[in-house]
Image (spheres, helix red, strand yellow):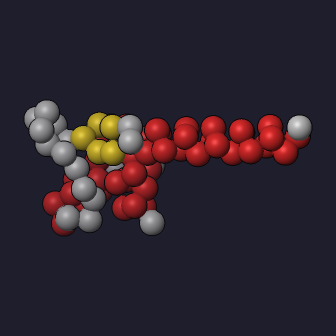
């Protein structure tokens, strides 16, 4: 019984982590998430080190892209 519960918890944890990595952040949220300044984030975007989307007219970042940049 306990093993089944642990397996269910691991599966839920995996689903939650995948969902969070698909979330979109604005530059202000990226700064809070990374503890970096807006100018540092903008420089990383300009150098091509950090991927972003500009479709909405402002910089938007997927959490997975920010995590990849931080690694």
Tell me: 7 left or right of 25. right
**Is 40 in front, or is 50?**
50
On the image, which quarter does residue 2 sit in? top right
**Residue drawn at x 84%, y 45% as measured from the top left:** 3
Tell which residue pokes out farthest to the top in this image.
56
The picture places residue 19, in percent across and down from the top left corner, at: 46, 38
Can residue 10 be seen here? The reply is: yes
Report the quarter where the C terminus lies: bottom left
**Tally of numbered tags:** 0
Q: Residue at x 55, y 40 (%)?
A: 15
Q: Residue at x 44, y 50 (%)?
A: 34
Residue 32 location, x and y as percent?
43, 41
Q: Is residue 36 above or below residue 19?
A: below
Query: The N terminus is located in which quarter?
Result: top right
Residue 67 lies, in percent from the top left, at 43, 56
Which one is in front, 3 or 26?
3
On screen, residue 2 versus residue 63, left or right, reads right
Which quadrant of the figure has residue 25? top left
In the rendered image, the vertical position of residue 5 relative to residue 69, given as above or below? above
Question: Would you say 10 lies left or right of 19 here?
Answer: right
**The one of 49 and 22 positioned closer to us in this rendering:** 22
Q: Residue farthest to the right?
A: 1
Q: Is residue 43 visible?
A: no
Q: Position of residue 28 (x, y in %)?
A: 33, 37
């Amino acid at each position: 019984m306990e093993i089944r519960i642990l397996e269910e918890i691991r599966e839920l944890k995996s689903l939650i982590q995948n969902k969070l990595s698909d979330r979109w952040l604005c530059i202000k949220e990226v700064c809070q998430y990374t503890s970096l300044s807006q100018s540092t984030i903008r420089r990383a975007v300009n150098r091509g080190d950090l991927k972003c989307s500009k479709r909405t007219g402002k910089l938007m970042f997927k959490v997975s892209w920010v995590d990849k940049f931080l690694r």
